[in-house]
Amino acid sequence: METRIERIKKQLHSASYKLTPQREATVRVLLENEEDHLSAEDVYLLVKEKSPEIGLATVYRTLELLTELKIVDKINFGDGVSRYDLRQEGAAHFHHHLVCIECGAVDEIQEDLLEDVESVVERKWNFKIKDHRLTFHGICYRCQDKDKEVEKVD
Amino acid sequence: METRIERIKKQLHSASYKLTPQREATVRVLLENEEDHLSAEDVYLLVKEKSPEIGLATVYRTLELLTELKIVDKINFGDGVSRYDLRQEGAAHFHHHLVCIECGAVDEIQEDLLEDVESVVERKWNFKIKDHRLTFHGICYRCQDKDKEVEKVD
DNA sequence: AACATATTTTATAATAATTATCATATGGTA
DNA sequence: TACCATATGATAATTATTATAAAATATGTT
Ligand SMILES: [Zn+2]
Ligand SMILES: [Zn+2]
Ligand SMILES: [Zn+2]
Ligand SMILES: [Zn+2]
């Protein structure tokens, strides 16, 4: 955790930005909630718990900055808010998501499943891929189990 | 075109909605601009050209309805607006997109490249896939050519 | 340290997209 | 035609995000 912050600090410095207390507090919230997919508002409320003096605009600016530096990825699951997702350290590509249409859970796939697809796209469509977004919408394993229970009862 | 509208009319009817003049005008705009990725506002302005009395709220409502019925797909490329994309008739899955980070162009891939990936996800993550969103961000063939020209000149 | 300068933050206003409200209009049916 | 559900249009309200400007903080220089 601390070393991770140190490295982010360096990334900021090498782009000539500082790791201000507000930025550090924001990064900490992202690290502490790595498995979640927080909106700017979510982040703001969590940061506020420990640093009540922070302003919402600062959180927005910090998230924008972290996005520029590819420390976080900004993603939209179609519900009208942008969500911010820490990139795995050293990950070449953004990970994939499984969004459950029954319970709303968002699970992650860290494995890169697109290597073959990407080489096809680069060759056949002559498109130089820099990044991707892949999201599956469907029923998560938990809800499948739930659904089975219901069937039994019926 | 006309037959396509007829079929959409049937789809609406079988869900007990009517194809009102406003809905038909909206669908026509989508059909006439099938290759584009229009926002609600874009659609509104185009519909207005031929049906000036239509209201923006009606366009939003119609697009929402068409989305529910899977006649169009709602997509977000990260620029803060939802865009609406006619689904290919009979297409099992939503097509993929290539978004150019230099010129903003959005190209489409109708071919389903995800079959293998999806079967892996269904098995390994035990996730029942209903839909997907796949977008590549990178440099389109046009901009790659442009970039080469610039290099020559330099 | 005192000063000048650049960066960052806060609070707030402004903007933009989308949704809600409600009175009116439409269209089919008894 | 009268009735009833549905749909529409104008507008207000809401929500997310961005812009603005004054104050605070940090950096570099004398
Ligand atoms: Zn679920
Ligand atoms: Zn994620
Ligand atoms: Zn391009
Ligand atoms: Zn498309």
Image: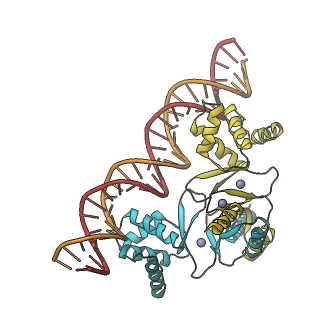
Chain colours: A yellow, B cyan, C red, D orange
Task: Tell me residue B89's x, y (percent).
Answer: 56, 82
Spot the residue most to the front: A153
Spot the residue most to the bottom: B3
Looking at the image, is B79 positioned above or below residue B119?
Answer: above
Q: Report which quarter residue A109 is drawn in.
A: bottom right
Task: Tell me residue A96's x, y (percent).
Answer: 73, 61
Q: Is residue A94 left or right of residue B107?
A: right
Residue A78 located within the stretch drawn in magenta: yes
Quadrant of the drawing holding the C terminus of chain B? bottom right
Task: Tell me residue A63's x, y (percent).
Answer: 65, 44
Looking at the image, is A104 positioned above or below residue B120?
Answer: above
Count of numbered marks: 0
Q: Is residue A152 left or right of residue B72?
A: right
Residue nearer the viewer, B93 or A118 = B93
What's the magenta bit mostly, secondary-structure-wise?
loop
Task: Tell me residue A74's x, y (percent).
Answer: 66, 53
Residue at 75% in and 63% down: B151
Q: Report which quarter residue B23 is drawn in.
A: bottom left
Ligand 2, image quadrant it occupies: bottom right
Whether residue A39 is visible to the viewer of this picture, yes or no, is: yes
Residue nearer the viewer, A118 or B16 = B16
Q: Is residue A11 left or right of residue A99?
A: right
Residue nearer the viewer, A146 or A129 = A146
Looking at the image, is A43 positioned above or below residue B150?
Answer: above
Range drawn in magenta: A76-80
Residue at 79% in and 66% down: B124
Whether residue A94 is visible to the viewer of this picture, yes or no, is: no
Residue at 64% in and 31% down: A51
Residue B151 located within the stretch drawn in magenta: no
